[in-house]
Image (cartoon, rainbow, N blue to C red):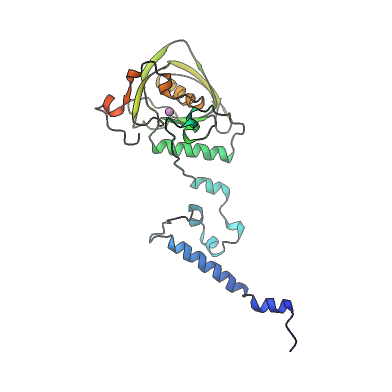
Amino acid sequence: AAAQSQAEHRKAVQQPAHRRRRGWETRWRRNTERNTGRNGRVFGHVNKASARRPESAILAPWRPALRPVRQKERSFHMAIQTILKMGDPRLLRVSRPVTVFGSSDLHALVADMQDSMRAANGAGIAAPQIGVDLQVVIFGSNDANPRYPDRPVIPPTVLINPVVTPLGSEQENDWEGCLSVPGMRGLVPRWQRVRYQGFGIEGEPIDRSVEGFHARVVQHECDHLAGVLYPMRMQDLSQFGFNEVLFPGLARDADE
Ligand code: NI
């Protein structure tokens, strides 16, 4: 009865492979069950991607080939960000130009902006409003905006590194609101007609000449990139106030 060699001892003490795997699987299943409701909805910290893994991936999660590919993950991306409010110094920064187009980071930023804008029924949103100091704005939608139901529809646009040039010298006063100045409206002078140039998300050039509400929205959003909020553009602060006081007849903006 010679003493066991070190290798033999290790082999005897170590659990067989199938037991080790079962231990891992049990722990995984217990965690999953704890976070899964009766109809398969996942709660708690388990992320959506793992919840939607195919059955084969659930049975063999250690196989990297079966993990969801990055392109798939992008379709799960949904993140309503907190919109910064006036007084936050991040709204006063001058934004940096975007240097790389079409990246997954840029797509994720635009997706966040779209989700946040839609959730707040905004007519547009600029990256600084969710705390990102990049020259990215989005505006427009295919449907009429519930906050501006009688306004013309502006095509959904992602505008990057924009340059806005006034066309003519005509200015116009109209009421504006801002997701960063919730519950309020002000009468703001803007150029009646402007030309705006910039790039889309993949770097495709954009060059449009617009007027009226479309021109106003573009000027408002691009102002955010220079750290300017609409009250800073107002000439008559007596025309600045709360929605429900200024427009008592209008339906209350629950989201503002
Ligand atoms: Ni705004």
Left or right: where 77 falls relative to 8: left
Residue sitting farthest toward the left: 249
Residue 115, position in %: x, y?
A: 44, 39
In which quadrant of the rendered image does the N terminus lie? bottom right
In which quadrant of the rendered image does the C terminus lie? top left
Q: In which quarter of the image is residue 229?
A: top left
Q: With respect to residue 249, does 193 lie above or below?
A: above
- Residue 157: tell me if it is visible: no
Tag count in the figure?
Answer: 0
Residue sitting farthest toward the top: 169
Q: In which quarter of the image is ligand 1?
A: top left
Q: Residue at x 51, y 69 (%)?
A: 26
- Residue 79: tell me if it is visible: yes
Residue 61, position in %: x, y?
A: 56, 61
Q: With respect to residue 168, does 16 lie above or below?
A: below
Q: Residue at x 54, y 62 (%)?
A: 56
Q: Which residue is drawn at 40% across and 28% down?
A: 178
Residue sitting farthest toward the bottom: 1
Q: Residue at x 49, y 47 (%)?
A: 76
Q: Nearer the viewer, residue 156 or 248?
A: 248
Residue 146, position in %: x, y?
A: 34, 32
Left or right: where 249 falls relative to 141: left
Q: Nearer the viewer, residue 50 or 182?
A: 182
Residue 35, position in %: x, y?
A: 43, 60
